[in-house]
Amino acid sequence: MPSLTSLLQEPGPTLIASLPRNDADLAQAAAAGGAHALKVHIHAHHQASGTGFGDLATERAALEAIRSSTDGPIGVVVGDGSAVATPQEVQELADMGMDFIDAYTRHMPAWMLRDPEMEIMGALAPEDSPEEWAVLAGLFDCMEAAVLPHERYGTALTAHDLSLYSRIRASVDRPLVVPTQLALTSQDVPLLAAMGMEAIMIGAIVTGKDTAGMESACRDFRAACDQIPRQ
């Protein structure tokens, strides 16, 4: 099984599907649609989907079913600031076969950076300054540009947004993932690829919350990704 960072180094943008709930049927739909990797959650309230996720004990059965249902890399959001995974939970995620962990850099305890068993994605927040981007990136294997404020969720991509992503790309020397905080379409993929983004991570805003929407969106975005060889 390839790691996330190995996928991010391959030609063409990588497609990651962020599941709106921890559900094996959704995972299978994303894989059927062509998602290269998946992202699931614990200890979080997901703003875009409105879903609340419990601790690992609560989510374990669903996560094990997801892990057994797909061969691609799976990452886990490990907290949202109000709660965060414990060292024991992180070890159990690794033992379960999860491939990477993800959280906003301001929510991730420093001890998680010592974990050698899973890759680590750090999410930049709207509050992070340009002066912080490069320094933060040096701590992680890859970065998520989750830099749009909540009031922009579900709105269209603008030229200003592209400029923001481009400035982050120029500052960060790690693979960069753009999540669909905005109502991105597959037609936006060439614009993001031109900015040098290694991955698009689609979630509830563009996939919806059911299996049909998930598979359809993944298929659409995967086709767009496959048309763009990355230099």
Image (cartoon, grey):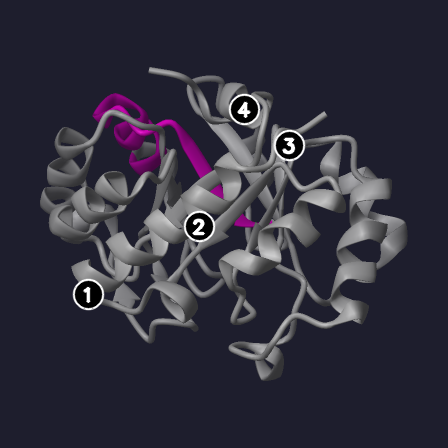
Q: Does the magenta segment cover residue 153? A: no
**Mark whose residue sits in front, 4 or 1:** 1
| Observer able to see residue 57 | no
Q: Residue at image x 71%, y 31%?
A: 174
Which residue extends farthest bottom? 151
From the viewer's perspective, tell me whether residue 24 is left or right of residue 159: left
> Is 169 or 188 nearer to us in this picture?
188
Kindly identify which residue carries mark 3. Answer: 140
- Type of residue at label 4? Thr
* Magenta residues (range): 89-104
Question: How dense is the environment of label 2, judged by Cα within 10 Å: few (below 14), some, or many (20 and up)?
Answer: many
Q: Quadrant of residue 152?
A: bottom right
Say above or below: 91 vs 208: above
Pointer 2 or 4: first along the chain: 4
Q: CA distance from mark 2 to mark 4?
A: 20 Å
Kindly identify which residue carries mark 4. Answer: 5
Pointer 2 or 1: first along the chain: 1
- Mark 4: secondary structure: helix
